[in-house]
Image: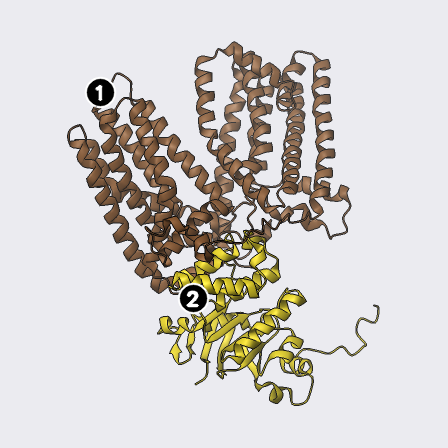
Chain colours: A brown, B yellow
Amino acid sequence: MSNGFRGQALRTVGFVLGLVLGACVAITAGIALALTGTVPVQTGFLVAVLTGSALTLGWALAPVLFFGIDETLDPARFALLPLSRGVLTRGMLASAFIGVPAVCALLASLGLVAAAGLRFGAGPALVALLGIGVSLTVAVLASRAITSAFARLLRSRRTRDLAAVVIALLASSLTPLQWAITAAARHGSVGQALGVAQVAAWTPLGAGAALPYDAAAGRWDLVALRLGLLLGTIALLAWWWSRTSESAMLAAGSGSVVRGARTVGGGAVGTLIPGWLRPFVRPGPGAAIVARELRFWWRDGRRRPALVSIIAASAILPIMLSVTTASPLADASSRATLAGFGLAVCMSGMLTGILLCNQFGFDGSAFAAHLLSRVPGATDLRARAAAICVIVVPVQVLVVVAVCVVTGTLANLPLGLGVLASTVGTGLAAAAMLSVLAPYALPRNDNPFAANTGTGSVKGLLSLVALVAGLVLSAPVTVTAIRYGAAPWGALALPAGLAYGYAALRVGTTIAGELLDRRSPEVLTAVTPTR
Amino acid sequence: MPALVLRGLAKRFDGAVAVAGVDLDVPAGSFFGLLGPNGAGKTTTLSMAVGVLRPDAGAAFVLGHDVWADPVEAKRRLGVLPDGHRMFDRLTGAELLAYTGLLRGMEPGEVDARARDLLDVLGLADAGRTLVVDYSSGMKKKIGLACALLHAPRLLVLDEPFEAVDPVSAALIRDILHRYVHSGGTVIFSSHVMEVVEKLCTHVAIMAGGAIRAVGPLEAVRAGRDLEEVFVEVVGGRVALGRELSWL
């Protein structure tokens, strides 16, 4: 682990910051959990089992969904070392317990031990400690087994690309899921929740947390039964994991198949820019870049998940925001409705720009082709912006129309579209500027699970800068629209927004393009992954 | 006029000298091999020569045009096969050629005709709708070469064109390069495979530690000896004496 820090002060600072933040959160959570030792037994049981289950489940799935697998410990890397399976498995297990998340989880769950101690005394507290240790082992083993099982599947590029999309969809559906759970919690009774907890306590997820409650009640038979369940799960997981990690070491074929040897009709240019588009599109550098970008947003395993989650977010966001702020009885032109609607559309439009904040990073060293053929910077930036608009803007327009229709506020439609146009324009302008000023290399391999560690993720935060800059730039239109947007003036927002957005994009790409013309070798160096 | 002239090209990375002032004259119509061990600075030198890596000092001229001061004219005459420079590999071979041609502002009709020729000659027409990312490494080198040749440049700069290429593809690439030089073009390529250089080149330069250590027509540099012998001597490598590794 210390090798990850060598000579990189920024990373070390990030790590320490993460450690401190994590410890603060963990200690707070631990204290909160410890306080459950003072509430009624039933509630305590409920909280303990549900938290324990959530922790175990989260741990098992989180690396796959969010953080990525640390490839330093990819089993395939150990394939050539003379290590027995047992040694390898134990070593990787031990390494899984070391790290910020593991320590934080341990700290937080010590709160459960404290709760048991507060309520029942020392004996059950010891049982609680045992339960937590066993539960954490289950969680770690499960996460390791799942990731190495996936690793095998992900050897082929095609599966990898597909998996990235599925994961992006899953991750972006988590927020609605959370809403659903909150809503259920609001309406459900404690009794129902207790039922859920009773069931969870008999699964490997929540069994560990339930142990002290059995022990305190003197039901040692139940304790033994739950422990047996946990240990059995551990044995099963260990067996599965050592099997999958062994097969993960065997390099599978790359799975490349030569696809249909169909001869290409209509010439090479026809395959890039279809013939029926010719009357509208003059084949040249700009058109070529648009055509290539359109293909890459779908074909590049790193772009597709980003695109899918941004599209999902830019659809979900305005729907949720306007549905929650617009009460059905309110007037379409009321200030609250307008503000909710306008801000929702504004955020949705801003998301388009986020995708292009590191647009040259997606190219990587292939960007050299643009340098070698001297593509004008402004042409390059405008073509990329146009391509992303072709993909994302129709969805956003559809969502705005749908929101207006569903909430019965069709009168606000021109306003919504105007705000959308202006924010898309300013967002893309800000992104163009940022992508030239602060490009960074994306990881070379395209395993969608590989975490972008170190400087990459730090620079990823820069997209927030573009977001804020875009919001500020678009503020004149958004604020004016919300302030004076009530019909009949609202209709003026459409042409005004279109003009403003177009002008912003035009000016932004001109300035950023001139900068790119001068800085393109530096941009290329910045986006070239180091070997 | 020389096809490529380098004057005092230098580059440091994080304080470490990668290229320490390279002067080189590549005569027009020559088949020029740039030899050197790994890490000698070959790729860095060629990247600066073609205008994708900004040098700390020095200048590069393609057929008299300064690459960094007058890039438009220089790059029009220049075709490049960059090593390690990933191509836009999520395109099919035909799409990639069309993309490269349009990017250079060529006429669509001309792009079509030349792309068809190149795909046929290089044996890539059968690949159909396979994406370049799924090509074998030999096919990748060939499509890269096709992209470099598409706009009929007068100077070809190739970085490791024969690395990881199967013998059949290598022979084909050699043939095409020979034909190109015979028709008046100039080729400079980097390599660390002596046999290839000995077989192909009219001129060689040996690079080590970021500087040119020997340069000239092949026969002059070789001086009747084996090129590999000269190379090891110039670079300063060691020859096993037989006493080491006695336990093996």
**Residue A281: x percent and y percent?**
34, 52
Q: Earlier in the sequence, mark 1 or mark 2?
A: 1
- Give the residue drawn at x 37%, y 54%: A287
Query: Is residue A136 visible in the rendered structure shown here?
Result: yes
Circle 2 residues within 10 Å: few <14, some 14–19, many ≥20: many
| Few, some or many residues within 10 Å of mark 1 (<14, 14–19, 20+) | some
Residue B177: which quarter of the image?
Answer: bottom right
Q: Is residue A292 above or below residue A143?
A: below
Helix, strand or loop status at disc 1? loop
Question: The residue marked by circle 2 belongs to what chain?
Answer: A
Quadrant location of residue A142? top right
Q: Residue at x 25, y 53 (%)?
A: A507
Q: Label 1 belongs to which residue?
A: A331
Q: Quadrant of the N terminus of chain B?
A: bottom left
Q: Label 2 amino acid?
A: Leu
Which residue was labeled with disc 2?
A372
